[in-house]
Image: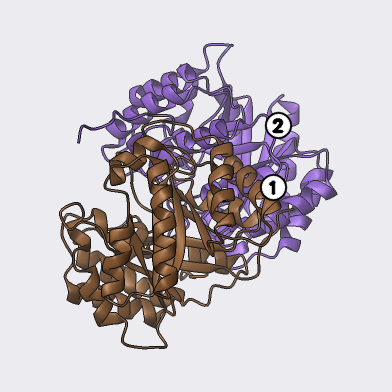
Chain colours: A brown, B purple
Amino acid sequence: MMEFPERVQINEVVLRDGLQLETKIASLEEKETLFRQLVEANVQTVEFGSFVHPKAVPQMANSGDFYEAISTESAGPALIALIPNLKGAELARLRGVERVNFVFSASDTHNEQNVNKKTAESVEELKAIQEFCGKNGMVLGVSIATSFGCPFEGEVPPARIHELTDMLVRMQIGIITLADTTGMANPRQVSELLSGLKDAYPQQKFNLHFHNTRGMGLANILAGLDAGIDSFDTSLGGLGGCPFAPGATGNVCTEDVVHMLHNMGIETGISLEGLLTASRTLETVVGHPTPSYLLKAGPSDRKYPVPNK
Amino acid sequence: MMEFPERVQINEVVLRDGLQLETKIASLEEKETLFRQLVEANVQTVEFGSFVHPKAVPQMANSGDFYEAISTESAGPALIALIPNLKGAELARLRGVERVNFVFSASDTHNEQNVNKKTAESVEELKAIQEFCGKNGMVLGVSIATSFGCPFEGEVPPARIHELTDMLVRMQIGIITLADTTGMANPRQVSELLSGLKDAYPQQKFNLHFHNTRGMGLANILAGLDAGIDSFDTSLGGLGGCPFAPGATGNVCTEDVVHMLHNMGIETGISLEGLLTASRTLETVVGHPTPSYLLKAGPSDRKYPVPNK
């Protein structure tokens, strides 16, 4: 029989991963409305934006202003910015950001598309970023993109992920995220890779980031839960995708994941009703329907009236 | 670590469950084209239609003619008809159908909506159906609808499913299908219920029928696989739903399930490419896009050319 944790941490990434692929650029005001509704729903961790070149990802150009607008309350959720390089860490610091997540790719070709560098060069840069964060009291997490496959190179060997993880563990990175950038992961792969990593590094905190490109997102989360993982990135409405990965489509949908977890008796601390309110707002902001199942079907404890025959 | 079977049987239900909810009624010719493409894809078991009142489900009114058209080849897939009562078994027999699947609901309210009877009355009728099938050399399977929850009554206690299963095992029903009629099942429920049933009846063959109403279909299949289940109903393109269950939407999508299984190293004997051909035909037949992920994204071993920068 499968085993599950009692409680799971949900990291809401819609304001970064979700909005970065939308053609309509969300205004500061729209982002703030969404953020307030996520806070209402008791979301504890929010990836609010990224410090990348505004020409590369114009949707994220207002991330600094956005941070200044939402970081006013001390009791709010943890606010994390994605950074692709040291420059990103510096820009984040200038705005007072305290938590950053550095992303590089396990595959050279995707890393080159993303940041114009070989993976080894990004790894080299990570050392400088860690030093910078240490000096400035910033918390640094690391995401390994294309951990389960690369849309250009194909299969990424598990040994490659073990090797990169080993390096990050030695560097004492607090949270290591393995990201399935274009929805190539399958549940057996997740089960085997994460069971192996949990065995090798029992004290290390891992977080998983799945896309639902081929419909396997929730099944991959289930495989992760069974392997002892209790932290997942999810995106409201199931929006998302990497601008530099062809074929990338939505992340796993926050409300669908939270609904599944609650039905399984796993706590998240999040209000499903609150998420659905925010998800309806999101459809208005982006101007199109999202892939959310829950928004269409309602929760499974919804009871229908019996029709007269 | 999770455990998986080496091989899984896929029962294709699009011609019955998939088409019965479509407003456009598929012609005999269109159904035949779809069927031939499914055979080309090497699908081994097909639920081809149902013998129900044509006023209740007009989409299935040509099931008898359809059977006569497709049952000509001895080497074809196993052909199964759904029947809701003894009358259905008799009508199927008149057309020469050799395999039928009797459906009743675990919850009285849904059974009443479906066939105007309490569950106990349907169970009583099952005895007559079994006798009829025995006399006429017909193979009888049984599906328990609303096994994981009822859209009218809510929760269906596991003890209820154990009790009904126990009765069916005693009756020596070859294959027992547990159906999640409106997508209310969650993976923990599937894991616990099926592990319990496999322990209690290790020799019994079970089949699972999931809807993807709340996005949990593939996760529920994963939980079923881990519990030792190796037979699943799936519907091409993810079409489907019960006409007498409000909120019912598509079944788990055949090509998405087969893709996941193959990526996990589990054999199905089915050609994914063949399924995608049939799935494209299906979209033409029904006249709208289907919820298929694979049709949009392509398989995960698809490699993209590296863009020039």
Vertical placement of residue A70 versus A138, above or below: below
Tell me the SS state at disc 1.
helix
Q: Nearer the viewer, residue A41 or B78?
A: A41
The residue that mark 1 highlights is B125
Residue B108 appears at what percent x and percent y?
62, 63
Q: Nearer the viewer, residue B209 or B191?
A: B191
Tell me the SS state at disc 2.
helix
Tell if the residue under mark 2 belongs to the same chain as the one under mark 1. Answer: yes
What subunit carries mark 1?
A: B
In this image, A151 relative to B89: left or right? Answer: left
Residue B171 appears at what percent x and percent y?
81, 42
The residue that mark 2 highlights is B133
Q: What kind of residue is marked 2? A: Cys
Q: Residue at x 67, y 46 (%)?
A: A196
Pointer 2 or 1: first along the chain? 1
Quarter of the view holding residue B46: top right
Quarter of the view holding residue A213: top left
In this image, A23 relative to A160: left or right? Answer: left
Q: What kind of residue is marked 1? A: Glu
Vertical placement of residue B248 versus B155, above or below: above
In this image, A79 relative to B85: left or right? Answer: left
